[in-house]
């Protein structure tokens, strides 16, 4: 039986209800994706359909909008340069997600070697103070409370290890465990165990919202 604090996301996929509400960040349609245009052909046009999902993963990997946009831009640039390596009929979405994650890891390693203020490894998911509690008195305060909830969800996701964040967000994007394993270059069993641990952690971190 489904627990009251869970929500079913596909067969056998349960997450805290508030995590599912976080959903994909519907941001890709507003992004200016340099180098991706009609002139790039069918691959470029099809790849743009995954901008929202890529941005959502990038946002939770990098921890901020600016780096997320840069990472998505870099992903598309790398994908277009490597278009000849993509086999028509294979999983374009998984291919793009793998490029994004590899680009993030490469960028993170560069930042570790040459740290700068505001880099990918300087994000502090616990740096913001929680807003005071209490029942909302007006629409403005209600909006502020919604922002606090969204921040708590973001903090919960950001508190997970990078690989756990990736499997959770890819799972929410509808990837199968086999596809996630392909992107992460690991065994399906490893993906299953990471998902189970991540879900349990998120349920614990967000238990105050599961009422």
Image (cartoon, rainbow, N blue to C red):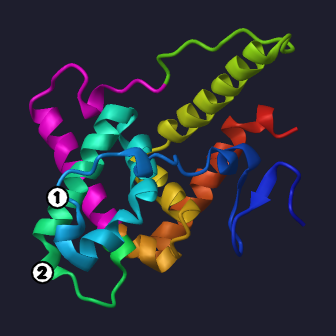
Q: Residue at x 88, y 51 (%)?
A: 4
Q: Vertical placement of 133 versus 176: above or below?
A: above
Q: For the N terminus, give its image quadrant.
A: bottom right
Instruction: Count neighbours of disc 1 (C-alpha within 10 A) and say few if under 14, some if 14 to 19, many if 20 or more.
Output: some
Most common SS among magenta residues:
helix
Total labels drawn? 2
Q: Residue at x 16, y 23 (%)?
A: 116
Q: Which residues are magenta?
A: 96-125
Which residue lies under the disc numbered 1? 77
Left or right of 52? Residue 36 is: left
Instruction: Count neighbours of disc 2 (C-alpha within 10 A) and say few if under 14, some if 14 to 19, many if 20 or more.
Output: few
Q: CA distance from mark 2 to mark 1?
A: 13 Å
Which residue lies under the disc numbered 2? 84
Q: For the C terminus, give its image quadrant.
A: top right
Q: Residue at x 31, y 33 (%)?
A: 66
Q: Vertical placement of 5 versus 191: above or below?
A: above
Where is residue 15 drawn, in percent x and y?
69, 55
């Amino acid at each position: 039986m489904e627990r009251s604090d869970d929500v079913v996301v596909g067969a056998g996929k349960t997450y805290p209800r508030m995590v599912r509400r976080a959903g994909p960040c519907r941001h890709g349609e507003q992004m200016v994706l340099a180098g991706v245009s009609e002139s790039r052909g069918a691959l470029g046009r099809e790849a743009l359909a995954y901008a929202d999902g890529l941005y959502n993963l990038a946002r939770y990997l990098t921890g901020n909008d600016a780096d997320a946009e840069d990472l998505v831009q870099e992903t598309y640039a790398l994908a277009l340069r490597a278009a000849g390596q993509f086999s028509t009929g294979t999983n374009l979405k998984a291919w793009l997600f793998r490029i994004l994650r590899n680009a993030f890891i490469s960028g993170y390693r560069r930042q570790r070697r040459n740290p700068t203020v505001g880099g990918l490894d300087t994000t502090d998911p616990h740096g913001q103070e929680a807003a005071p509690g209490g029942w909302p008195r007006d629409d403005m305060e209600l909006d502020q409370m919604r922002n606090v909830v969204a921040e708590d969800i973001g903090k919960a996701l950001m508190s997970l290890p990078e690989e756990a964040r990736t499997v959770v967000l890819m799972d929410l994007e509808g990837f199968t465990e086999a596809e996630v394993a392909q992107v992460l270059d690991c065994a399906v069993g490893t993906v299953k165990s990471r998902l189970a641990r991540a879900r349990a952690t998120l349920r614990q971190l967000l238990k105050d919202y599961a009422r």
